[in-house]
Image (spheres, rainbow, N blue to C red):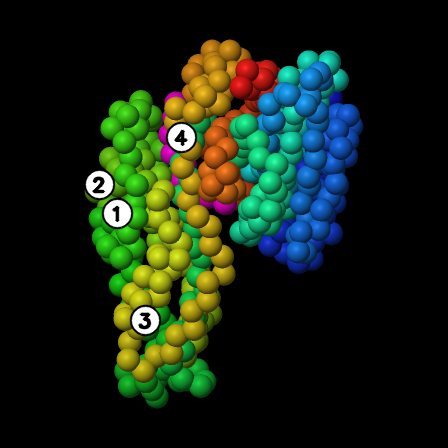
Amino acid sequence: MSEWFDELAQFLRIPSISADPAHAADVVRAGEWVRDLIRGAGGSAEVVDWHGQPLVVGEVRASSNAESAPTVLCYGHFDVQPPDPLELWSSPAFEPEIRGDRLYGRGVADDKGQLYLLLAGARALARAGRLPVNVRFACDGEEETGGHSIVEFLEADDRGADAAIIFDSGMIGEDVPAFNIATRGLLYFHVEVSTGSTDLHSGLYGGAAMNAAHALVRTLQALLASDGRLAEPLREGIVPPTARELEDWRQLPAGAGELAGQGATPADPAAAEEFYLRTTAEPALDINGIATGSPHLEKTVLPVRAVANVSVRLAPGQDPETIAAAFERLIRAALPDGAQLDLQRWSSARPGIVPPDARAILLGQDAFERVLGVRPVLVRSGGTLPIVAALADRGIPTIISGFSLPDAQIHAPDENLPARYVPLGIETAQALFEELGKL
């Protein structure tokens, strides 16, 4: 354990928080760490400044007949979420630690630890002279804040690939692997409502002057889902799950257990039964944060400014521009007369779909079954990976999988990964490269 832990810990200790400009140099430093590992595997790699964003672009060539060998593109991101709130971590966020059977630290599951599995797997085969494919790495440092640099890079890169692998997902349950054949897209908005020039004394003006907090709540209420379904304009373009997918979902853990396991309260009586439909195949709108007035101190103020961040997860098949336009129409229609709205779209990403019968997918399932003894189930992911749509546009079938578990605490304190999955994941990555050599 010491060999892989010591190496991976070096990577995890770098606080590569892309959302915080104060850590911009750390994001670059994490990219340099990835670059150096690829070079240490006998490959070539560089950190490329892509319009201000660091990308690591590199390749480890096949051990023999590289010119005719298949090419496998591997993607991962070396930036991480902010660690706040720090007081809820059981150990420092950027000081990885093994407690019990879990490895803890920011980035162990999303995505540094999982990217490491692919890097170490390619290196092991290359050093043994048994790498049957050209492994090309394209990794970014802004996935947690949009992920557009990698998409733009791929659109400008005409080399293509025979298959792609992304370890930025997880298992359905312990030792129950899954391949994601679809990902949801994302729209992220910043909403500001103003109703006057200065905050007012609620005793003197309450009931007569418009309250920005009230106006914002009324506006957003009109956009929220009813029984798990958004308004029709926000549902346009959905590609529904196939009968085969619905049948596979019956093998998945019950939605009630998935919610209970996270300490979550079902949104409505049907939420548990429709868990996988709602989280992978339907669009979802969430208010991610609200700020207005005086929420912590007793202050009888009538606020005239209220702000909120609102995200929309797009279902496979939906177009971000179409849904963004519908969102703006709906929110402006719901705004109370007299209130002013400032609506900014901070980021967007398209959903992606992978052909489930692609040969690369079948070979990938063979590889996982060879190592784990279990054939991965084909499911959809509720998360967003902008690169998936870009790869689909290029006709590159993509294996989207990983070793994270549902209780990995991704984006939360005490992010974790089973420690035994690190060597097992490296072995699985090797098996993937070997199987994809048959393409």
Q: Residues within 10 Å of mark 1 (few under 14, many from 20)?
A: many
Left or right relative to 240: residue 111? right
Instruction: Tell me the CA gap for discs 1 and 2.
Output: 8 Å
Instruction: Tell me the CA gap for discs 3 and 2.
Output: 30 Å
Q: Which circle marks residue 270 in the picture?
A: 2
Look at the image and give the residue range highlighted in magenta.
Answer: 377-386
Percent of width and height locating residue 280: 35, 39
Left or right relative to 307: residue 109? right
Total labels: the figure holds 4
Instruction: Tell me the CA gap for discs 4 and 1.
Output: 27 Å
Residue beneath the point at 38% across and 60% down: 324
Percent of width and height locating residue 318: 35, 48
Asked if the residue under mark 2 is in contact with the one under mark 1, i.e. CB atoms within 8 Å, the reply is yes
Percent of width and height locating residue 266: 29, 43
Q: Is residue 276 above or below residue 133?
A: below
The numbered mark, 3 or 1, whose residue comes first in the sequence reads: 1
From the image, tell me which residue sits under label 3: 332
Q: Residues within 10 Å of mark 4 (few under 14, many from 20)?
A: some
Left or right relative to 425: residue 272? left
Residue beneath the point at 46% across and 38% down: 392
| Kind of residue sitting beneath label 3 | Arg
For the residues carrying marks 2 and 4, which lies nearer the camera in this image?
4
Asked if the residue under mark 1 is in contact with the one under mark 3, i.e. CB atoms within 8 Å, the reply is no
Q: In terms of secondary structure, where does tag 3 sit?
A: helix
From the image, tell me which residue sits under label 1: 228
